[in-house]
Image (cartoon, rainbow, N blue to C red):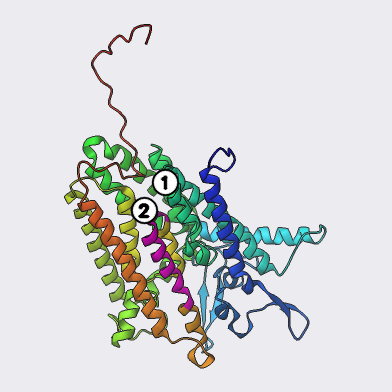
Amino acid sequence: MGRARYWTPLRVVLLFAIVVLALAWLGKSPCLQQYRDADGALSLDWRNDRQYVAMCYSDTVPLYGGEGLADGGLPYRDAWFDTAADGSRTERYMEYPVLTGFFQWTNAQLTDGWQWLAETLPLPTALDVVVYFDITAFWLALAWLAVCAGVYHLRPDRPWDAALVALSPLALVHVFTNFDALAVVAATGGLVALRGRRPVLAGVLLGIGGALKLYPLLLLLPVLLVGLRRRDDGGLRTAVPLIASAVGTFVLVNVPVAALWFRGWTEFFNLNRTRPADPDSIWFVISYFTGWSGFDGPLQSGQVPAVLDTVVAVVMIVAFAGLALLTFRAPHPPAVAELCFLTVAAFLLLNKVWSPQYSLWLVPLAVLALPRWRLLLAWMTVDALVWVPRMFQYIGVANKGLPPDVFLATVVVRDAVVVMLCVLVVRAILRRSDGSPEVDPVWPAALPRRSSAPEADAGPGR
């Protein structure tokens, strides 16, 4: 940055990220407003559908009270009960992977500690749920800063790529919507460690990411495929320890919880097995616009969409097999970043659930796989704007909201743009020639081979 020693490119990128994160917090702040009810008690002001009208909804707020965190419950051990309209009660447990569950619990304990200190020290305070949100947002902000730094270290010669991650409209809208920034930083850290020739550490980070949100484990497939394609250059010596350490870490984190509280540990898997097609998924879009009742027909409450689950699994296997074919038929080994983007994009496009914040998974991968500023910024903007009709459809047309048709139309546009990005990445892989420069920012660069010929005597004067 000229002659200034302090404002390095990385620090400028992080400053961009801090500004966006501050704006992201302000975007959620309407949902942190308080008011006094008729009894004079302080309550969270979500009256008149404020969370939808102000588009400030965050899962963090309802989960604090809804999953027993406010009452000091221990995830996976302590249950609570949902009461249906007919009076029936369903036993529920923490519905997130292990590390995300304990992340929420830790923040609840920090909230209790902050409120205790605020009783004796002049600390700012509010309702417990507001303090809990702010503590959670602090850690998520640090995680996103680390994501930006990780992308910078993977492409230090192109700091504007990391700046695009920092300025992403998706981060502005969704970094505080859920806890996905934690998994994104674990996955990005794994890629940085892989680039630094530390495959075991890379695997550990991906295993931790899998215990936060399963998607980082999807990145093991691209690593395996590239390792097999580069096996003549020792690619398997990198891929095998990475995959082994990732699986080992994931098992090591999950086994103690599964052994102690198996019923609570299975809640995450049971929930994803029994969920119907999410409104953000292509399966729901097809069903809505065609009037088709789905593979399983009308579902009762709690009924498993067994046929849909099977179809989703089959089409994903076919998509991943296609990625394997692409890897081995391409004229040159694809970049790990390219295959990672295609793998996660295929998962999101074909899965029965695409929660809005899942799009954060793609941000660093897209920037590394297809570093084209205008195109990626257009996609991120379209994807972020899906949030608007999604929120306003919950208000209802009678209350001046939007019909589902508008929201589902934006989902189709979002999916089409992501498919276009995938096509461009595939085309780049197939068109790569011998003269192309090194494009893989993740796979360790080949070490220069030592020459067996004796060095010429340079002479004392040289």
Q: What is the quadrant of the C terminus in the image?
A: top left
Mark 1 and mark 2: span between their CA atoms?
A: 9 Å
Task: Describe residue 459's horizontal placement relative to residue 153 as left or right.
Answer: left
The foreground one among 260 and 410 is 410
Amino acid tagged 1: Arg
Point 52% across, 85% down: residue? 395
Magenta span main SS? helix
Please give the residue where the numbered disc 2 appears in the rendered image: 371
Amino acid type at image mark 2: Pro
Stretch of the chain drawn in magenta: 364-388
**Residue 175 x %, y %:** 52, 62
Give the quarter of the image for residue 157: top left
Element assignment for label 2: loop
Check disc 1 and report its element: helix, strand or loop.
Answer: loop
Q: Residue furthest front?
A: 2
Question: In the rendered structure, which disc, 1 or 2, sits on the residue that comes first in sequence?
Answer: 1
The residue at the point 20 percent across, 52 percent down is 430
Q: Identify residue for label 1.
A: 158
